[in-house]
Amino acid sequence: MMRTLLFTAVVLIVAALPAGAQVSGHWCQTHQRYEEAYKEDPDAFKAIERQLDEAVVEYASQLGKVDDGRTFYIPVVFHYFHPTTEGNYTSFFGEDAANAVIQRINDDMNRNNADSNDIQPYYATFRRGNARIKLIRAQLDPDGNPTTGINYISTDLTYNRNRNTDNEIKYMSYWPSTKYLNFWIVKELEGEEGILAHATLPEYSASGSTRMSEDGVMGLLDVFRQNIGDRFYRHALSHETGHWLGLRHPFQGDNSVLNSDGTSSGCSTVDCRFGGDKICDIPQVKEIIRTCVRNEMTCTNENRIDNLTNIMDYRYCPAMFSKGQVTRMRGTLVSFRSELVSYENLLRTGIGTIAVADIGEKVEVYPNPFFDKIIVEVESQNETTSCIEIRDLLGREAYRDCKKKLLQGQNRFEIDASEMNMGAEGIYLLQIRTPDATITRRIHYKPMN
């Protein structure tokens, strides 16, 4: 599967450089951290990297069996490290700011971002993906106590000049990365001027190059507050979340194509599933490019015009994830980060019974506990087909009907216990999935003696 798909469309956008965006070099330090992790033990890193690549390839070949299209929910915790002199620190990063970050990432992941009109027609029509991944602030902390999903830590280590490394401050406040996506917010980051954020790739902790307590996304307060008007900055945390879910930069080469000076080009001749950024439906980019130039084709061996709006690029016009990128992110979730999105973890972090309110379905389940049958009432805004599943807390299927029709308005149906593959008394999860949402309810099966 080489990168040979032809693309000759010529109607592309031109985007002006945003005022005030003067970032040079790598604003995303994930690139340097990737190279450092690789150099520590190239053989070990290449082996674990190949494992993820093969897991994604296997996932893509078994989509209908290993992924039924459900929305994956990710519990999130924000750690804000504020200076000891900062009095009203919640005014700098509070629940409204946290919700804005999550909304921005969720919009980008699920094709709801307002700047999508800038996507080149070919990519918008045939290549733009919907990840069906949603972040939600955790409702329970690791000890099972209620939480807002925001931790406030008073420390002057929030300034880079007061600490040795960025990882040093992560140890001050960390929740298990197998259960939560950790966002660390600081005033300054280490490294050259212009660094905005960085993230850990899923291979890091698996290869041993990164401790589990370092796994997550770290960035500047200004980026998390979303208070910089430039579009480039507004998508930065979606970019980093993409890294955390296994995505690379499109200008990330693999030494299969060399520049005239002998350095590696971002172009690739390796099988696109394993070389470059490991994405097949959008082309590699020869090098870091900032501006959005009409009809640019930087890797001529691919014969495809660059996808200017790739969120994982450094151009100033980010707007989309491709279908191939979606496959890699979801493949990462069902392999390297599977515990995070498990039914059990959604309950453990308090988000398992949160209904998705943005489409308006209302669900009632009764009696609960039940012994002979369960009754489900669903209010739907539109006529649609739904998938009804019941699983135990280990994810084992007890019931499945993916042809259940919902009419507009109120719907009522019964599921007899004799139709369910249930064992002894226990807690199960009933899930209703429509094309627009996934709603989960906790039910208690209590058979009569």
Image (tube, grey):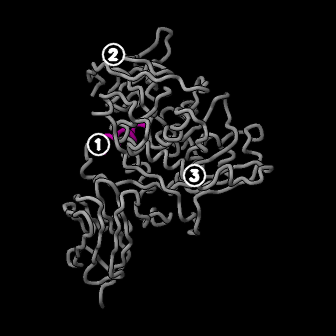
Could you tell me how far apart the alpha carbons at marks 3 and 2 are, in whole angstroms? 43 Å
State the residue position of label 2: 301
Task: Choose between 372 and 100: the one closer to the eye.
Answer: 100
Task: Tell me where residue 202 appears, x and y as whole percent.
Answer: 48, 43
Task: Tell me where residue 241 appears, x and y as whole percent.
Answer: 49, 43
Task: Choose between 316 and 162: the one closer to the eye.
Answer: 316
Secondary structure mostly seen in the magenta stretch: helix
Instruction: Kindly identify the amino acid type of the residue bearing the numbered disc 1.
Output: Ala
Identify the residue at image location x=49%, y=65%.
350
> Of tags 3 and 2, which is closer to the observer?
3
State the residue position of label 3: 98
- Tell me where the magenta segment starts and ends, as one range: 49-60
Task: Choose between 442 and 263: the one closer to the eye.
Answer: 442
**Left or right position of 198 against 55:** right
Q: Which type of secondary structure does the marked residue at label 1 adopt?
A: helix
Task: Choose between 217 and 317: the one closer to the eye.
Answer: 317
Instruction: Kindly identify the amino acid type of the residue bearing the numbered disc 2.
Output: Asn
Quadrant in which the N terminus is drawn:
top left
Compared to 284, does 389 lie above or below? below
**Left or right position of 118 against 122:** right
> Of tags 3 and 1, which is closer to the observer?
3
Answer yes or no: is residue 33 visible.
no
Tag 1 and tag 2, C-beta contact below 8 Å: no
Quadrant in which the C terminus is drawn:
bottom left
Answer yes or no: is residue 205 visible.
yes
